[in-house]
Image (tube, grey):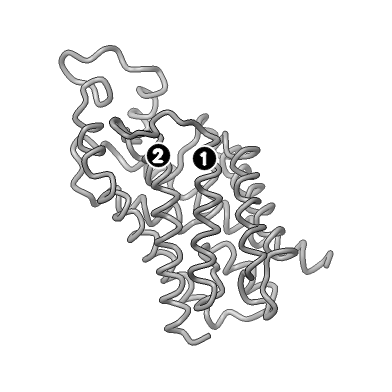
């Protein structure tokens, strides 16, 4: 794979991943969406199918890492870091493009949601829920969850450990079952297996933090949230933003170490 193939493949694949994954979050969250309040199961399966679709589209070009944690784990496993910058650059750019596409697809719903006094507060609004007040105090705007993750209970150690554990499960599944014949990315069957592993992680381990398990998936859309001209969007919760970046990277290194020792 050439450096240009890697960059293009990762940009395209990660954009699709975030378009569909962020899209299901928007569908469940936003006012005037037909899927509003569909629930966590819809989100977990939506993200799983987003992974599957993105892998099948990008695998012929880049091996479909779509996640800096996967890239770092494979670099450790194969002792080859030469292509890591192309993967990471494409993943971050693709995640930002995907987030913009979610905004465009749900443009009217974003406007309706963020101008509703019952959601954003203001004169005439009813009392906000304790959870909404807590989120606002922490700097997380009312639609930030569409773009990036956030904890239900803010505990730095717990939040970090949760992301590490979830990423270890993901990376071990990728390294043991998901790789193509060259061992440098996801294969056809591996894409399907990984998709269902992502669903499993979401259903079983996603409750505490929203299961980023992918630094680019969280950081790229969070940057877009900070830049988009959304009315009453609130903060982007930058005080938390390091956890879904550092946690998955630590988890990837631990999983790669376990793989190298055990397998």
Label number found at residue 85: none
Q: In the image, what residue occupies the spot 25% across and 37% down?
A: 109
Mark 2 surroundings within 10 Å by alpha-carbon count, few (fewer than 14), some (14 through 19), many (20 or more): some
Mark 1 surroundings within 10 Å by alpha-carbon count, few (fewer than 14), some (14 through 19), many (20 or more): many
Q: In the image, what residue occupies the spot 49% across and 87% down?
A: 2
Q: Is residue 73 left or right of residue 19?
A: right
Q: Is residue 136 left or right of residue 160?
A: left
Q: In the image, what residue occupies the spot 42% across and 83% down?
A: 4
Q: Please name the residue that numbered disc 2 is placed on.
A: 145
Q: Is residue 145 left or right of residue 202?
A: left
From the viewer's perspective, is residue 215 above or below residue 6?
above
Residue that lies at the very extreme toward the bottom in this rendered image: 2
Q: Quadrant of residue 5?
A: bottom left
Q: Are the residues tagged 1 and 2 within 8 Å (C-beta)?
A: yes
Among the two numbered marks 1 and 2 on one chain, the one whose residue lies closer to the N terminus: 2
Q: Nearer the viewer, residue 8 or 85?
A: 8
Q: Please name the residue that numbered disc 1 is placed on.
A: 210
Q: In the image, what residue occupies the spot 35% across and 36% down?
A: 140
> In x, y percent, where is residue 70?
59, 65
From the viewer's perspective, is residue 192 above or below residue 37?
below
From the viewer's perspective, is residue 96 above or below residue 48?
below
From the viewer's perspective, is residue 83 above or below residue 158?
below
> In x, y percent, where is residue 248?
57, 54
> In x, y percent, where is residue 69?
57, 62
Residue that lies at the very extreme toward the left in this rendered image: 123
Asked which secondary structure carries label 2, the reply is helix
| Gap between marks 1 and 2 measured at Cα | 9 Å
């Amino acid at each position: 794979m050439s450096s240009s193939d890697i960059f293009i493949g990762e940009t395209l694949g990660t954009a699709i991943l975030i378009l569909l994954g962020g899209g299901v979050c928007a569908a469940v969250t936003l006012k005037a969406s037909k899927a509003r309040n569909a629930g966590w199961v819809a989100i977990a399966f939506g993200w799983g199918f987003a992974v599957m679709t993105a892998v099948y589209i990008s695998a012929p070009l880049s091996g479909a890492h779509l996640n800096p944690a996967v890239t770092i784990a494979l670099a450790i496993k194969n002792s080859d870091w030469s292509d890591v910058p192309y993967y990471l650059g494409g993943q971050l750019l693709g995640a930002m493009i995907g987030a913009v596409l979610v905004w465009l697809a749900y443009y009217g719903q974003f406007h309706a949601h963020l101008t509703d006094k019952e959601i954003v507060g203001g004169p005439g609004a009813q009392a906000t829920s304790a959870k909404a007040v807590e989120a606002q105090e922490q700097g997380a705007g009312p639609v930030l969850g569409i773009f990036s993750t956030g904890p239900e209970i803010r505990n730095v150690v717990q939040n970090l450990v949760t992301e590490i554990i979830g990423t270890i499960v993901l990376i071990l599944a990728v390294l043991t079952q998901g790789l193509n014949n060259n061992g440098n990315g996801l294969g056809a069957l591996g894409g399907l297996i990984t998709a269902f592993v992502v669903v499993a992680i979401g259903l079983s381990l996603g409750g505490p933090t929203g299961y980023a398990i992918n630094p680019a998936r969280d950081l790229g859309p969070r940057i877009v949230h900070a830049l988009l001209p959304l009315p009453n969007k609130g903060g982007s919760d930058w005080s938390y933003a390091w956890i879904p970046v550092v946690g998955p990277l630590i988890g990837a290194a631990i999983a790669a170490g376990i793989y190298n020792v055990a397998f």
